[in-house]
Amino acid sequence: MARTEMNDVSKMRKVSNIFVNPKVQGKFLLLLVGTGFVLTIVHCWMFYLYNIETYRYLVELAPQGSEIKSSFDSDLLKVLIFLALSSLVFTGIIALIALIFSHRLVGPLYSLKNTCDQIRDGKTDLRLHFRSEDELKEIGESFNQMLDSILGRSQKK
């Protein structure tokens, strides 16, 4: 295999390592990011509604000229934009953390499903091998013990 082909395969492998089951992980991330987006809009709107009346009242009472008073409105808009952007950045960070967590959860489940499918097709010598940090490592060990027990019983007969 040529060097460029190997690099392309390793890049594809890295993406597939992150998205073990794109359908499940995509739905999870879409739900999370959509919720974050809606919460950002609601948060900014509530901030605006809560503060606009007080803000305009204080601007009317201020002894400054009309130019300075109009700059206060642009300052309020800047605060709202900063609030929205910081909320969206926070949502992005949470989405990355959720992607890592979903990988650690979906990966072992996907491996379990594939192993069960292969065992159903007659490959009874397969075993689950999870990393030590995987969330479902104990289930994999129990599955392997169960399969060993079933094979032991069938060999005795």
Image (cartoon, rainbow, N blue to C red):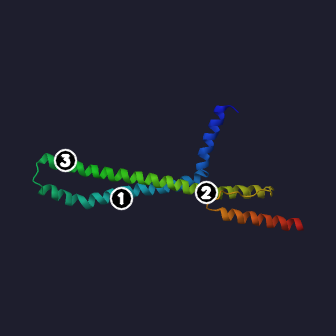
Element type at mark 2: helix
Element type at mark 1: helix
Q: Nearer the viewer, mark 3 or mark 1?
A: 3
Q: Which residue bears the numbered disc 2?
A: 106
Element type at mark 3: helix
Q: Which residue bears the numbered disc 3?
A: 71
Amino acid type of the residue that numbered disc 2 sits on in the rendered structure: Val
Among the two numbered marks 1 and 2 on one chain, the one whose residue lies closer to the N terminus:
1
Q: Residue at x 50, y 52 (%)?
A: 96
Among the two numbered marks 3 and 2 on one chain, the one whose residue lies closer to the N terminus:
3
Q: Residue at x 21, y 60 (%)?
A: 53
Q: Quadrant of residue 130?
A: bottom right
Q: Is residue 123 left or right of residue 61?
A: right
* Image quarter in which the N terminus is found: top right
Q: Position of residue 86 (x, y in %)?
A: 37, 52
Among the two numbered marks 3 and 1 on one chain, the one whose residue lies closer to the N terminus:
1
